[in-house]
Image (cartoon, rainbow, N blue to C red):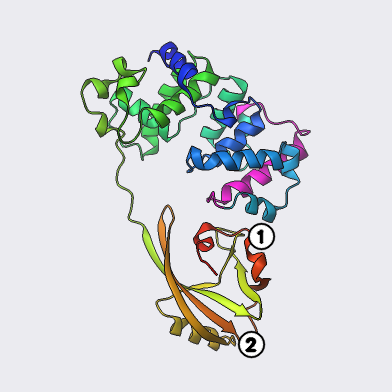
Amino acid sequence: MDIKQLETWYLSNHRKLSFRMTKNPYHIWVSEVMLQQTQVETVLPYFERFIKIYPTVEALARANEETLHKDVEGLGYYRRFRHMLKAAQIIVDSSGKRFPDSYEGLLALPGVGKYTAGAIMSIAYNKPYSALDGNVIRVLSRLLANDSDMREEKHRKSLDQYNQKMIESSTPEIYTQAMMELGATVCRPKNPKCEVCPLQRECIAFQTKTVHLYPNLSPLNQKKHEHYVTLIIHQNHQIMLRKRTESLLNDMYEYPQYEAESIEYVLSMLDDQGVQLSLIGEGKIIQHVFTHKVWQMQVVHVKLTGNPMNDWISVDSDEVKQLPMAIAHRKIQV
């Protein structure tokens, strides 16, 4: 790989993103966590607002978990932010408020894997540690015409070893960002801009006109469809909510919902548990797509005429928007 050509291209062509304007390892950590499974365009306003609210790792360590969830509502994958809060508290408690500056120290933090640790070490500290994400896998698969199944860990490990070799001959802080930027803006999954790629002459896939074949990714399992009756439970001027305890969307608020095909079944089931609801009317069917599943939610408005379930929480209607709620339920217009 012509690393000098790649780095020269990056310095002249990269997007001027706010999280690239700093070498602060804490800021870079925040950006990398936010960018997991999330597009740059979506992350930018969240990142800028987050850094204003939590400008240091100490400020983050003092955060209230529910408030933090509200501050990142809409980004999804909320477990990453619970890990981030725990990691910030560990840093402040055990490291004298000093952000870790070693690969091993970063890996010891909750939620920090090899990619995130590699990105922080290379970008913030200019140390040669590979950071292999989806963009880099795509670039290297095409460059080398590597047709191994990149869903398998052993094949990703092989590319990671190649990437490590390259970064050891580079300026790490530039190389890592250059590879990410190349994959995001030029070596795209569809309609790649091969004509402006700085690695065009070396790219075997381009030379053999097989760019569309890489990376080789075996098919994912079909998403599981789950059908829910989602209740908007009215009581005077209040709405009943529930705070989730399930791993998916843990600690986010939701309208109580039950995996069922009909409202009659749900009303009967709750009546058996001593909860009386009267039907007001049915609303729209709302769909929300997660990574591995799809929720089909039949929204139904009901009135509570007796005692609520133990895990229901009564909230004023105008306060619902102030609580952290997953986008799946934020789609529901009450």
Q: Nearer the viewer, residue 163 or 196?
A: 196
Specify whether 149 is left or right of 120: left
Residue assigned mark 1:
322
Point out residue 176 in the picture as x, y percentages from the top left corner: 49, 24
For disc 1, the neighbor class at 10 Å (few under 14, some 14 to 19, many from 20) is few
Identify the element where label 2 is drawn: loop
Residue 129, placed above or below residue 38: above
Does 296 appear in magenta? no
Residue 157 visible in image: no
Residue 228, placed above or below residue 11: below
Point out residue 164 in the picture as x, y percentages from the top left corner: 46, 22
Q: CA separation, marks 2 and 1?
A: 26 Å
The residue located at (51%, 85%) in the rendering is: 279
Q: Identify residue type, mark 2.
A: Gly
Q: Quadrant of residue 146?
A: top left
Residue 253 visible in image: yes
Point out residue 42 in the picture as x, y percentages from the top left corner: 51, 43
The residue located at (33%, 49%) in the rendering is: 220
Residue assigned mark 2:
306
Q: Quadrant of the C terminus?
A: bottom right
Q: Quadrant of the N terminus?
A: top left
Specify whether 53 is left or right of 266: right
Point out residue 72 in the picture as x, y percentages from the top left corner: 60, 49
Confirm or deny contact between disc 2 and disc 1 (CB under 8 A).
no
Q: Which mark is residue 94?
A: none
Q: Quadrant of residue 3?
A: top left
Total numbered circles = 2
Q: Identify residue type, mark 1.
A: Gln
Mark 2 / mark 1, whichever is N-terminal: 2
Residue 235, placed above or below residue 210: below
Identify the element where label 1 is drawn: helix
Q: Which residues are magenta?
A: 74-103
